Image (spheres, rainbow, N blue to C red):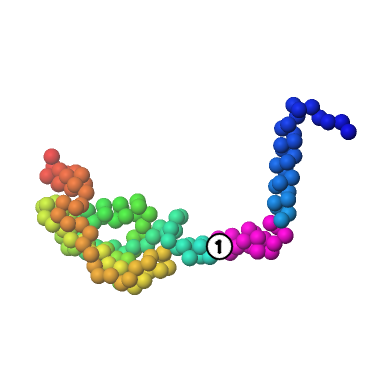
Amino acid sequence: MARRPLDYTEDGMMRDALFIVQKDLHYLLRRRETLLWTFVMPIIFFYFIGTVTGGFGGRSGEAEPISVIVPANAGFVADELITRLEQRNFHVVNTPGFFREIDIPENFTATVLAGKPVKIEFARHGEGLEYGLRSDPCRPRRVYGAGGFDSDLVERYSTLKRGV
């Protein structure tokens, strides 16, 4: 029987490692529960977790609808607010009682330009689950207070109004 020279030890180590892998896989894959937990349960878990958390990320490509109630004398700052909502992927509708609603007060632009406190109300009606919201019906909340609106916008338009 001829023996290999001692400088070929890497081949022997690789062969031994492959032998252990083969025996281990053969032992594990003979058991039904190993097959179940390795190949079947991950698919079930993917489905279950995807179903449970599917709506929480929002709709990536579609604009989220929101109702903005604007009185006739609200002014150009209300129009700018609507434009900025649309830039942030909202589809602005004018439907009172919509499940997500922003109410802009009368004389909104004049009040903002005068530097007085402005109260914009945001209300959610119902559950709104069709758009991935997990909310209880909530009362209107104050969104912007004094100085809470974009000061650059107010400064720019008050300068235009004065004609400077």
Residue furthest to the right: 1
Residue that label 1 marks? 45
Residue 92 location, quadrant: bottom left
Q: Is residue 88 above or below residue 71?
A: above
Name the quarter where the C terminus is drawn: top left
Residue drawn at point x = 73 percent, y = 48 percent: 22
What is the magenta range? 28-47
Residue drawn at point x = 17 percent, y = 63 percent: 106
Name the element at disc 1: helix
Q: Nearer the viewer, residue 125 or 68?
A: 125
Q: Nearer the viewer, residue 15 or 162?
A: 15
Q: Nearer the viewer, residue 1 or 73?
A: 1
- Residue 30 visible in the shown view: yes
Q: Is residue 39 above or below residue 98?
A: above
Residue drawn at point x = 21 percent, y = 49 percent: 150
Q: Position of residue 2 (x, y in %)?
A: 87, 31
| Magenta highlight: main SS | helix
Q: How many marks?
A: 1
The answer to whether residue 128 is magenta is no
Q: Position of residue 75 (x, y in %)?
A: 20, 56
The answer to whether residue 42 is magenta is yes
Label 1 neighbour load within 10 Å: few <14, some 14-19, many 20+: few
Q: Nearer the viewer, residue 87 or 12?
A: 12
Residue furthest to the front: 1
Residue 59 location, quadrant: bottom left
In the picture, measured across the screen, residue 16 lies left or right of residue 122, that is: right
Residue 44 location, quadrant: bottom right
